Amino acid sequence: MKTFFSASVLAMMAAGASASTVDFGTNLDMTQNPAAVTSHGEIVDRFDFGGGISGFLLVENNRLQTPGEARIFNSRLSNTSDDDLEGDFVNSADANDVRDFGNILIIQERANLADSVADDERAGGAITFVFDRAIDLLSLDYLDGERGARISAGNNETLGVLNNGQSGDNQFTSFDFAGLDAAQGITRFRIDFVGSGAIGAFDAAVSAVPVPAALPLMLLGLGGLGALRRRKTTAS
């Protein structure tokens, strides 16, 4: 069983940093990424999207309690355990925006079943992305969220909410976090699934000044100012 996956990356510039569009459905280069998880039903607990976007997942399952399983669901398949996640998805806010997400990420309803039995948890749960370095979260696409969802970061600060009935089967909702302070310089974000649902893609960028690196620099600067003041006092 593979324990991490690598998604292909589209490079772009945002907020002065190189951003990565994490698309679970884009074709993966198995030659360059031999350990990439691409198969329907594979369990994911670590990730490396390239561009410095790496870390691990924490998964909670409301039915089975914690821990739960996050699995890849290939929405291009038919006759799966969940036909709500099969085929293309329509933007709940724009019927002309239709997307083929391919591989998406779900909370597994029935843990420890065969890889072929991938099915999203109708009772809900949560997936937390924990990053090895601070990132800026720019956007996220949530699929099949008829019962709603909540995205949060930092000290449980809400970034976005999908209300009950706002989205439905074979629909997705796009959240835009660009310029939102609460989504900048974070080391984790969490998606709470009220019921069934899936993560289709998200955009993230390594922060220009990661929080762990910025703090020592700030303290060093404050120490330097203190020493400078002491020298001026001694000279006078």
Image (tube, rainbow, N blue to C red):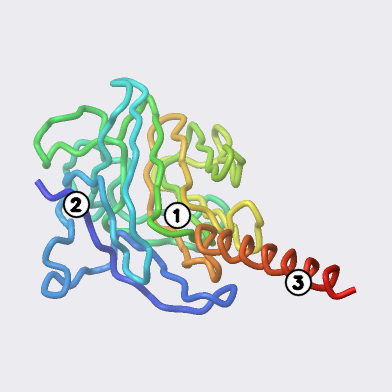
The mark closer to the camera, 2 or 3, is 3
Task: Depth check: give the residue in front, 101 or 71.
Answer: 71
Give the residue pinned by disc 2.
Answer: 77
Location of residue 216 in the rendering, given as x and y in whole percent from the top left corner: 56, 61
Which of marks 1 and 2 precedes in the sequence? 2
The furthest residue to the right: 236
Figure quadrant of the C terminus: bottom right
Check contact, mark 3 vs mark 1: CB within 8 A. Answer: no
| Label 1: few (<14), some (14–19) or many (≥20) C-alpha neighbours in 10 Å | many
Q: Is residue 225 visible?
A: yes
Q: Is residue 100 visible?
A: no
Numbered-mark total: 3
Location of residue 138 in the rendering, given as x and y in whole percent from the top left corner: 54, 62
**Looking at numbered disc 3 in the image, what kind of residue is underneath it?**
Leu
Give the residue pinned by disc 3.
Answer: 228
236 with respect to 136 (left or right):
right
Task: Depth check: give the residue in front, 153 or 132.
Answer: 132
| Label 2: few (<14), some (14–19) or many (≥20) C-alpha neighbours in 10 Å | some
Q: CA distance from mark 3 to mark 1?
A: 61 Å
**Looking at numbered disc 1 in the image, what kind of residue is underneath it?**
Val
Check contact, mark 2 vs mark 1: CB within 8 A. Answer: no
Q: Residue at x 46, y 48 (%)?
A: 188
Location of residue 212 in the rendering, given as x and y in whole percent from the top left corner: 50, 58
Q: Of the numbered discs in the image, which one, if any, rests on residue 90? A: 1
Q: CA distance from mark 2 to mark 3?
A: 67 Å
Q: Quadrant of residue 61?
A: top left
